[in-house]
Image: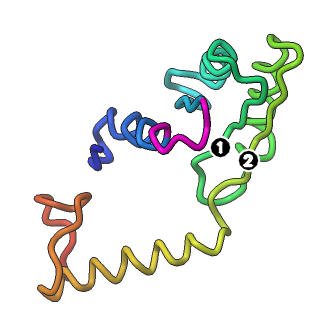
Amino acid sequence: MSTDPHDPGAEQAFVDEWRQRGQFAVVEAAHMELAEPSIRSAFQACVAAGATTVVIAPFFLWPGDHWDRDIPALAAEAASRHPGVRYLVAAPLGPHPLLGDIVEQRVGHCLAHAAGEAPECDLCAGTGRCGLR
């Protein structure tokens, strides 16, 4: 999986890895705006693959206008083309309690690396970003 945040394939690699976990029959990437696949086209792909319920899982850290208004409106519009298919817009990542654990783990590893006690993580490898200044 690419961990370079500037690599356009990194997002697709994340989705592919999630799909391979096998908990959900269909997993598709989607974008709210400015990029493809759109929520509409990803919804269509899910239905074409046999989904009768589509869950939109926003990759956001916190609730906001996109979660409150924009994504539900885009989901409703996509669903209107598929009578009988139900949908759900899931909650964003925060304030889930495990998110704090992830942040603590990341900060701890970065501090250990800066102290020479751990290697660079995959995200920072070769960038020189993870160091005390």
Query: Which amino acid, mark 1?
Result: Ala
Q: Earlier in the sequence, mark 2 or mark 1?
A: 1
Q: Is residue 13 left or right of residue 36?
A: left
Q: Is residue 132 left or right of residue 14?
A: left
Q: Are marks 2 and 1 in contact (CB under 8 Å)?
A: yes
Q: Position of residue 59 (x, y in %)?
A: 57, 48
Asked if residue 22 is among those painted magenta in the image, a careful observer would answer: yes
Q: Position of residue 12 (x, y in %)?
A: 40, 34
Residue 4: image tag: none
Is the stretch drawn in magenta largely helix, strand or loop?
loop
Mark 1 residue element: loop
The local crowd at label 1, few if under 14, some if 14 to 19, many if 20 or more residues have their Cα within 10 Å, is some
Q: Which residue is mark 1?
A: 57
Residue lying at 58% horizontally and 72% vertically, measured from the top left: 98
Residue lying at 56% horizontally and 32% vertically, measured from the top left: 27
Whether 37 is drawn above or below 12: the answer is above
Residue lying at 71% horizontally and 23% vertically, measured from the top left: 51
Q: Which residue is mark 2?
A: 90
Q: Position of residue 11 (x, y in %)?
A: 41, 39
The residue stretch that appears in magenta: 19-25
Report the quarter where the C terminus lies. Answer: bottom left
- What is the residue that sits farthest to the right in this orientation? 84
